[in-house]
Amino acid sequence: MGRFGLLPLLVLPAVAVNLLTFLWPMLNLAGLSFREGMPGGGIGTDFTMATWRDLLADEFYLEILLRSVGVSLTITGFALLAGYPLAFFVHRSDARWRNLLVVACISPLLISAVVRTYGWLVILGDRGFAPSLLRGIGIDPPRLVFNMTGVIIGLVEILMPYMILSLLAGFGKLNQTLEEAAASLGAPPLTVFWRIVLPLTLPGILLGCLLTFVLTISSFITPKLLGGGRVLLLATEIYDNAIVTLNWPLAAALSLIALGVFGAAMVVYGRIARAAERAIA
Amino acid sequence: MIRSGPGRYLFLALVALLFLFLLGPVLLVFPISFSADSFIAWPPSGWSMKWYAAMLEQPTLGVALRNSLILGSIVTVLALAIALPAAVALSRGTFPGRDAIMAGLTAPLLLPTIVLGLALLIIFVGQGLIGSWPGLILAHLLITVPYALRVLVTTLGTLPASVEEAASSLGAPALQVFFRITLPLMTPGLIAAAAIVFLVSFDEVVITLFIVGPHLTTLPVALFRYVESRTDPLVAAVSVMMVLFTLTLVVVLERAVGLRRAIGGKAG
């Protein structure tokens, strides 16, 4: 026993919390998807593939899966389009202002998702800020809440700080002298962007997209409140089955599908990131 | 890229618009909280403080706020007490499986909270922990210990090990080195970890939604339920108080370590 002989024992309390609140519940959840949900919240005791069979045979759940992935990709795309100019501006601003701007970009992260979603109800609600603005300039406003539009607008804003953080982390390689060199050799601004800025910032873009996609898939509060129960996604289905219809085996199976989507996203990210690295190098 | 001519002004206008988009929802909650209407309408037909008065008379939200503050305080103390020894072991010790343990301990942050909430619900129902303080505390430790661990391991990693080595080479016992040298040097990191743990606990809603019972609820969950059933400016008044409270904590955090470093790794 050296001076640090007992040191490893110090991790035990943290490991105990992890086993008790994470590993055990997650393994139990996986096992539960191989039980059968009984009407009224009961759970069968025998091993069965029934839950998985019903789930995979039901087109309703395939639709939900495809919709969730589609919505998440859409939101990721918008968050990138909205986050990139902001991150670029912050990256290029004076050192004096940069810190303040970074705080402005990411401080929304510290405010409860419920509060920020409520803020969107204030803006998008039928008598809210945006419709009254549209009426003011003579446009008949479309319905902006309790549908997919509201969910997409709200989630793009709520997840944008993660995108900006990832982009900023990846902007480190961006070197203004490279752009200046290209421009002084006569390259038009768009060419400079496509050939120099975009490739150099690609790692940050990919990381931001992965993060935003994964967070959208697991978002629940915003789709629930801005979707008004009319936007059915993987996360809202998990909640409804767990709390409303009390079909825990089905909720467990849907959870594993959500984890599967997570895993798939990481594999796709890894492939693209490696291919991009090769293409740039 | 764009530094002259109309292009630059267009770019600046775009950036301004995007900033408004990003901060708009939080900013608009302030004027709406002074609305005299009994529903959300822009512009409000008049101004009043009545929703702030209504907030004080709302028993459910008041109790929920008290619960959230108590829960946040208990969880902050426990999470630090659990994460600090682990962080010391993981950053100062060399033993097999160290990296795997670190990965395992921070793994809960990688998974969707909705899945974690469901997994806990099922276990907690069997143990009679639903709607109980121990249940809520355990659920919040699940997601706060990883944050605390990450901040503290980073803090310990940036401390010069040479000071500790000097002290122990002069014959100071390991425990004395820790309490007299290491711990005081860690103060900024400890403050940051405490602030983050408290904020994460205070804002946590998805996992908590699965764990709360009819007689024990937290502020974010009570607000979620309120907004789910009706939208009036009362929530705006509560939101304003929450934003101001968070801002205060953020200023403390910024003073202690710098916000970006503190939440830079937050992912969910």
Image (tube, coloured by chain):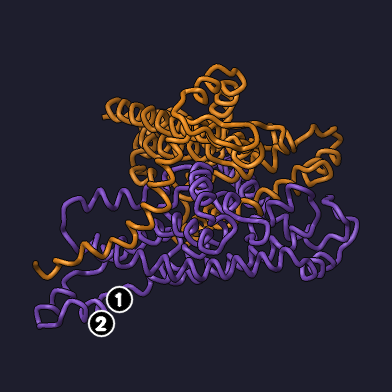
Chain colours: A orange, B purple
Q: Residues within 10 Å of mark 1 (few under 14, many from 20)?
A: some
Whether residue A186 appears in this view of the structure is no
In which quadrant of the rendered view does residue A265 lie? top left
Residue placed at 42% from the left, 60% from the top? B262
x, y percentage for residue B52?
Answer: 79, 68
Residue beneath the point at 85% across and 39% down: A135
Q: Is residue A184 left or right of residue B86?
A: right
Which chain is disc 1 placed on?
B
The residue identified by callout 1 is B183
Give the side of residue A116 with respect to residue B80, left or right.
right
- The disc at residue A76 is none
| Callout 1 amino acid | Leu
Asked if labels 1 and 2 touch by Cβ distance under 8 angstroms, the answer is yes
Q: Residue at x 18, y 67 (%)?
A: A6
Chain letter of the residue beneath label 2 in the structure image = B
Q: Which residue in the protein does label 2 denote?
A: B180
